Amino acid sequence: MKLTKDTGKLFLRVYNNKMIDKRDEQGKEIECDETMLCQLVDRVFGDGLEKGDPSLLNQFNNLIVQTADEVAFGQFQRILEMFAVFDRVPSRGDIKRYKIPKRVRSRFSWSATGSGVLMQRHENDEYILATPRFYQAGFSYDPNDLLTSTVENFRRLVNDIAEEKYKFLLRRFYAIVDASATSGAIPSALVAQGTNLSASAINGVLSAVTRIGGSRPIVVGDRAMIDKLGETIAKAFGTTFTGNNLPESVKERLFNDLNYTTLGKADAISIQNNYTDDALTKTELDVDKAFIMSNGIAQRPFAITDYGTMTQKTSQDFETDTVELVLGMSMSIMLLHGEAIGYFEDDAVTI
């Protein structure tokens, strides 16, 4: 038996809660996605009476990963478009180049009649080629979870993989921006780093971003960082950092569970940043960093090129039956416009 593209469509319908459930006048089932998913899981992993079919396991995991890739792409569209231009190309062999426009204005040179006119030359735009890199991550799950509460645990499995890809990109953003702030690729006027940042340093970056973008900036970071920035501004200027001033067009592009607040001259969005240990001392992303963008600037700071879809290699532990996957993806992640992003880092911020 071989799983087909129709199985992939079934997975997407189940994940998106758009399952087909057709019945006749007597209520007898004609076509039901939930039943089909449960039957497929039984065939792959066994139903307690018959053993599963190992030949289907790799195909099943391929479709799980492809479904997660589609879900992750939807997440990118809603929030990462603030950070980046996002493109998908079929394979690593495809060439993708990005235009780097010169930041120039029209120039004129006036002269007296008869003395000649100096023609001002404009430089051509530059282009940069995306260079793919291959990334891998280990992942595992217990198939017994899928044999009980199949639909719920199927969605959780897809979510776990999709969220990891999304969080991977955020972690790469953090690392690249941190390195770019140190190297000078991001102008110093757009960077404030230190311990207990002052209100003047914070407002200096916000003013610079506003001047470049010509619109109210948006600060994105952990809730602890947003609160610290807001408290500093409030103490210095007597302003508040509560409320919700983001336009509806911006909200629609973002996750519903993000928190929106006013932060002095900017709007602020606190991203979800889960604990990664039982002692509640570590988080997935740094809590002491924040980015500042402006909707008014045409260029997004980052360019992401996704080559093909995520891949996986499957193995299964003989003793525990745990399914183990090695996930792989080819991506190019570049900071193209350092002047399009600001950066706060305050090492006094902790959880």
Image: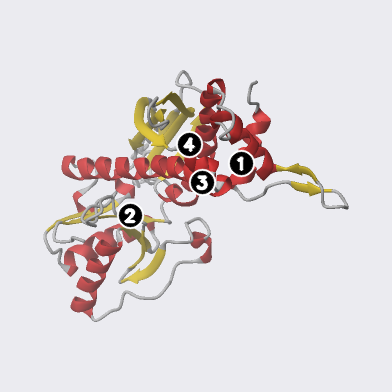
196 or 95, nearer to the observer: 196
- Inter-mark Cα distance, 2 to 1: 26 Å
Q: Which mark is residue 44?
A: none
Task: Tell me which amino acid carries mark 1.
Answer: Leu
SS for callout 4: helix
Q: Circle 1 sits on which residue?
A: 12
Where residue 233 sits: x, y (%)?
A: 23, 72
Q: Nearer the viewer, mark 3 or mark 1?
A: 3
Q: Are marks 3 and 4 in contact (CB under 8 Å)?
A: no
Q: Where is 283 relative to 146, above or below?
A: below
Determine the CA span between mark 3 and mark 2. Answer: 20 Å
Q: Is residue 124 positioned above or below 73 on the image?
A: above
Q: Are marks 3 and 2 in contact (CB under 8 Å)?
A: no
Q: Earlier in the sequence, mark 3 or mark 1?
A: 1
Between 136 and 129, the one nearer to me in the picture = 136
Distance of mark 3 from mark 1, alpha carbons? 14 Å
Quadrant where the C terminus is found in the figure? bottom left
The image quadrant of residue 106 is top left
Q: Answer with mark 2 or mark 1, whichever residue precedes in sequence.
A: 1
Q: Earlier in the sequence, mark 3 or mark 4?
A: 4
Please say whether residue 100 is visible from this viewpoint: no
Q: Residue at x 51, y 30 (%)?
A: 61
Give residue 153's mark.
3
- In the picture, measured across the screen, residue 133 lies left or right of residue 25, that is left
Residue type at mark 2? Asn
**Can you identify the residue that label 2 sits on?**
274
Give residue 28's position: percent from left, percent from top. Answer: 82, 48
Where does label 4 land, which residue? 143
**First in sequence: mark 2 or mark 4?**
4
Task: Indicate which disc, 1 or 4, sits on the residue closer to the N terminus.
Answer: 1
User: Are there few (<14), some (14-19), or many (20+) residues within 10 Å of tag 3?
Assistant: some
